[in-house]
Image: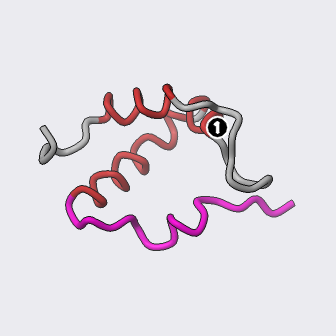
C-alpha cells in the first residue's frame, strides 16, 4: 500500500480531516478554501501529490507558499 499512487478519494479524505481554519501565515488559504473549491482545485492537488509520489519532490515553489492574494 505504501508504494501505490494516491487516489483522489484518499487525498480528499485527508483534506476533509484537517482543521479548516488554520494557516501558517495570515494571508494564505486554509483548508476551508480547499474544501469549498474542491471541484476547481482537485485536479491540481491530485497532480501535485502524484508528482511528489513519482519524484519524491513537491512541485517547485509549493513549500514556500501556494498562492498569495494581492489586494
Q: Quarter-wise, where is residue 2 in the image?
A: top left
- How many marks overall? 1
Q: Position of residue 39 (x, y in %)?
A: 49, 33
**Quadrant (top left/top right/bottom left/bottom right) for the C terminus:** bottom right
The local crowd at label 1, few if under 14, some if 14 to 19, many if 20 or more residues have their Cα within 10 Å, is: few
Q: How is the image coloured?
A: secondary structure
Expressed as whole percent of the image width and height from the top left, the position of residue 32 reads: 64, 33
Closest to the observer, 61 or 18: 18
Q: Using the image, determine if residue 21 lies above or below residue 44.
A: above
Q: Is residue 23 magenta?
A: no
State which quadrant residue 4 falls in.
Answer: top left
Element carrying mark 1: helix
Q: Quadrant of the N terminus?
A: top left
The magenta segment is 54-71
Q: Is residue 64 magenta?
A: yes
The residue singled out by tag 1 in the image is 33
Q: Observer-nearest residue: 24 or 27?
A: 24
Question: Secondary structure of the magenta portion, mostly?
Answer: loop
User: Residue 30 at what x, y percent from top left?
Assistant: 65, 42
Left or right for 34, reference 29 = left
Residue 26 falls left or right of residue 53: right
> What residue is shown at x 37% (from left), y 36% (from top)?
11
Please indicate whether residue 71 sits to the left or right of residue 57 in the image: right
Q: Residue furthest bottom?
A: 60
How far across and how far down the image is residue 23, in percent?
A: 68, 47
Query: Residue, x 71% and y 62% (percent of image)?
Result: 68
> Which residue lies at the image location 38% right of the left edge and 64% below the top edge?
58
Amino acid at each position: 500500500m505504501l508504494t501505490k499512487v494516491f487516489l483522489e478519494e484518499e487525498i480528499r479524505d485527508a483534506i476533509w480531516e484537517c482543521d479548516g481554519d488554520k494557516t501558517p501565515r495570515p494571508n494564505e488559504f486554509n483548508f476551508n478554501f480547499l474544501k469549498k473549491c474542491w471541484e476547481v482545485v482537485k485536479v491540481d492537488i491530485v497532480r501535485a501529490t502524484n508528482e511528489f509520489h513519482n519524484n519524491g519532490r513537491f512541485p517547485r515553489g509549493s513549500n514556500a507558499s501556494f498562492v498569495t492574494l494581492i489586494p
